[in-house]
Image: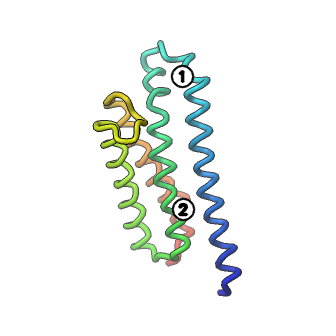
Amino acid sequence: MSVDNRFIRNRKYIAVNLILFAVLFLSVSFNKNYIRPVYRHHATVGVITGSFSNFMAAWVTSLFSFTFILVRKLQAKKARLFFYGASVFVFIALAVEEIVPYTGASSTCDAFDIAASGIGVLAAIATYEIFLKKRIVR
């Protein structure tokens, strides 16, 4: 493959990650500014909207690693191991941030946020297994 084709392919993967970041940013911002204020006083819905940003952060951040898999053309076993490992790392980083805030993203420790991060990572793994795995080199 020529250098130009590789550069164009890498640009596509960068674009995919930028789109994922935009989805994360826009969904979290929309939730924070419009949905959370309306439902903050409802017990169940308030918890869901309050933890939505953790779910989205875990899901989207875990999916970022998929473009690395495609760029490196990892084989199926290595790709799965890398994706699962990256997803676990994302969960651990978000859980630690929730317990001991180090970026300022969290101000209080909330078990629902940790659970939402776990569910987000599981959603990313499901997304990988259902939709993305077939794009891997066998």
Q: Which residue is nearer to you in this view: 114 or 136? A: 114
Q: How is the image coloured?
A: rainbow
Question: Could you tell me if the residues under marks 1 and 2 are in contact, i.e. CB atoms within 8 Å?
Answer: no
Horizontally, is 20 left or right of 50 in the view? right
Front-most of residues 119 and 114: 114
Q: CA distance from mark 1 to mark 2?
A: 31 Å
Q: Eyeballing the image, is 33 above or below 69?
A: above
Residue ID at (40%, 66%): 82
Label at residue 132: 2
Image depth: mark 1 or mark 2 in front:
1
Q: Amino acid at mark 1?
A: Arg
Specify which label sits upstream in the sequence, 1 or 2. 1
Q: Residue at x 65, y 60 (%)?
A: 15
Image mark for residue 124 = none
- The reply, left or right, for residue 113 in relation to residue 11 is left
Quadrant, the N terminus: bottom right
Disc 1 crowd, CA 10 A, few/some/many (<14, 14-19, 20+) = many
Side (left or right) of 26 relative to 115: right
Quadrant of residue 113 within the rendered picture: top left
Q: Pinpoint residue 26: horizontal percent, then vertical percent.
A: 62, 38
Which amino acid does the dot numbered 2 rest on? Answer: Leu
State the mark number for residue 36. Answer: 1
Q: Is residue 100 left or right of residue 39?
A: left
Q: Position of residue 120 (x, y in %)?
A: 44, 44
Q: Which residue does the image show at 47% across and 75% down from the upper left?
A: 74
Q: Position of residue 29 (x, y in %)?
A: 59, 33
Q: Position of residue 52 (x, y in %)?
A: 48, 33
Residue found at the very far bottom of the displayed protein: 1
- Residue pictured at 49% horizontal, 17% vertical: 40
